[in-house]
Amino acid sequence: MSGSPGARQPFTGSTTPGPSDDLLQPFQIDVSGLRGRLVRLGPAVDAILTRHAYPDPVAHMLGEALALAAALAGGLKYDGVFTLQTKGDGAITMMVADVTSSGDLRGYAQFAADRLERARELAGGGDLSVPRLMGAGHLAFTVDQGPHTERYQGIVELTGATLADCVHHYFQQSEQIGTAVKLACGHGPEGWRAAALVVQQMPREGGTGEPGTTFGAADPERREEFWRRAVAFMGSSTTAELLDRDLDAKRLLYRLFHEDGVRVWPAHALRDRCRCTTARVESVLRSLSRDELADLQVDGAVVVTCQFCNTARRYDDAALDALFRS
């Protein structure tokens, strides 16, 4: 996932001068041979999480997943949809977070309330880890660029105490590229907020940042030293800093990496936007027979609810008749 599965277009979310919310901020540390992305989510993640009224542990995990999906997608060249998905046998049975190449975010989670309550009891008021919340399962990344291109997919077992640990495991096993990830999600007076910080080593042959600048030290030992420094700097960031709406993304990156000369590129806007449409729903309904639709009726109507945006569309007999006449 460090490269470009389809090698079409880069992540194209529109640039934005916004100070701290709903953006992906790419950056580069030339002397270290490192590139990274900082994602800050405010109103977008709050809207996604609150419309489903998830219990806090579920909302927290999905918020991290949404920020992580945007951060990983920002490092790829693609024209389509990047999807992060987990499946497990724990309290959270499924979690999906996806982002389009234009910056549209959406996500949802499925959970078993009884298992969640049991996990809370076992945690005894402490943090709920991935094993306690998700159990055994897998984490998958998919890049879908449309019907005429091959889908790229990477899968790894859920391994580690946190979602960040699971991603580290994926890159160690599948990509074999130095990758550090830090995630944060929390709820405050302004609602839910989430953040992701990703730093990756780039191959020496990755080239230069600008004419006349050397991207990364040539000596492997020096490159490893720079990598350890960057990971240490990154580790010094706190959850409060990552989620602070008043701390500009550029100022946070400068605070963390200024000793090695961090540079930022134009930020990309992220937004809460589902891709479901009435036209798509009605196309599916038309593909069913009237007998099949009758079996789906509850209280005299077929109700189709989008798992992502929770929008419900109701079709009674009169609406179905009109649908088939159109």
Image (cartoon, grey):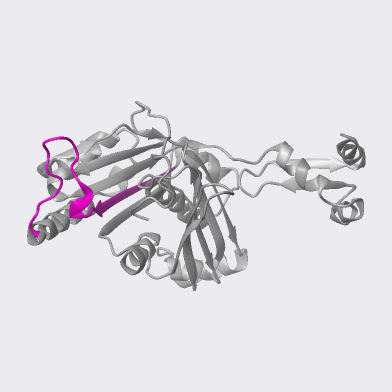
Magenta highlight on residue 94: no
Residue 124, can we see it? no
Residue 230, can we see it? yes
In the drawing, does residue 186 fall left or right of residue 135? Answer: left
Residue lying furthest front in this view? 148
Q: What stretch is highlighted in magenta?
A: 193-219
Along the line of sight, the residue nearer the viewer: 192 or 73: 73
Along the line of sight, the residue nearer the viewer: 117 or 72: 72
Measuring from the top left, give residue 146's x and y in whole percent: 56, 47
Q: Which residue is drawn at 87% across and 52% down?
A: 293
Residue lying furthest top in this view? 17
Where residue 55 sits, quadrant-wise, is bottom right
Q: Residue at x 38, y 50 (%)?
A: 4
Where residue 264 sits, quadrant-wise, is top left
Q: Which residue is drawn at 25% across and 47% down?
A: 35
Along the line of sight, the residue nearer the viewer: 41 or 168: 168
Where residue 20 sits, quadrant-wise, is top left
